[in-house]
Image (cartoon, rainbow, N blue to C red):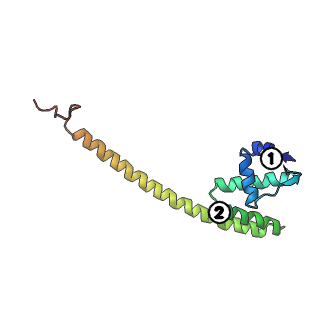
Amino acid sequence: MLGIQDAAKMLGVTMRTLRFYEDKGLIAPQRVGTTRIYSRREIGRMQLILRGKRLGFSIREIKEFLDLYEVDPEHVEQVRTLRVKVNKRIGELRQQKRAIEQTLEELLVIDQQAQDWLNDAPATEANGKDMTRD
C-alpha cells in the first residue's frame, strides 16, 4: 500500500498524472479519509496504462482493455482484443515508417541539390559582388 507521492515516484509520474487517470476511471485507489492509497492492483494497472500510452494507444483503448480484464476471468477475450489492437497499431506504425522514410529520402535529395548548387555558384563577397570578376 502506497500513498500518492510514493506511488507517483515509483511509477515515474506526477501526482497529477495519477489523479488524471483516476478521474478517467482507469484506476480507483482506496481512500482513507482524503488520502489516496494505491494497492498492488492499482500500481499494476498504472504500469499497464503507462505501457499502453508508450505504445501509442488512446486512453479509451486502454480503458476498454482494462475493463475486459475485470469481466473475463480467463482473459481469453482480453487477449483476443489485445491482438486486434496490437496488429492495428503495428499497421499504423509501418505506414508512418514508410512515410518517414519517403520524406527523409526527399529531404536528402533536396539537401544534395542545394549543396550541388552552392558548389557550382560563383563565389561572392559579403556585399554580394562576384569575386570571380576584377
Placement of the C terminus among the 4 image quadrants: top left
Q: Position of residue 133 (x, y in %)?
A: 11, 32
Please report the residue visible at 70 percent of the width from the left and 52 percent of the height from the top. Answer: 50
Please report the residue visible at 74 percent of the width from the left and 58 percent of the height from the top. Answer: 23
Q: Residue furthest left?
A: 134
Please report the residue visible at 48 percent of the width from the left and 58 percent of the height from the top. Answer: 98
Is 29 situated left or right of 118 in this image? Answer: right
Name the residue type under label 2: Val
Q: Label 1's element?
A: helix
Is 83 situated left or right of 95 in this image? Answer: right
Q: Which residue is mark 1?
A: 4
Which corner quadrant of the image does residue 12 belong to? top right
Q: Which mark is residue 86?
A: 2
Which corner quadrant of the image does residue 129 belong to? top left
State the residue in front, 42 or 98.
42
Name the residue type under label 1: Ile
Q: Position of residue 79 (x, y in %)?
A: 74, 65
Question: Which comes sooner in the sequence, label 2 or label 1?
Answer: 1
State the residue in front, 132 or 19.
19
Front label number (2 vs 1): 1
Q: CA distance from mark 2 to mark 1?
A: 31 Å
Q: Residue furthest top?
A: 134
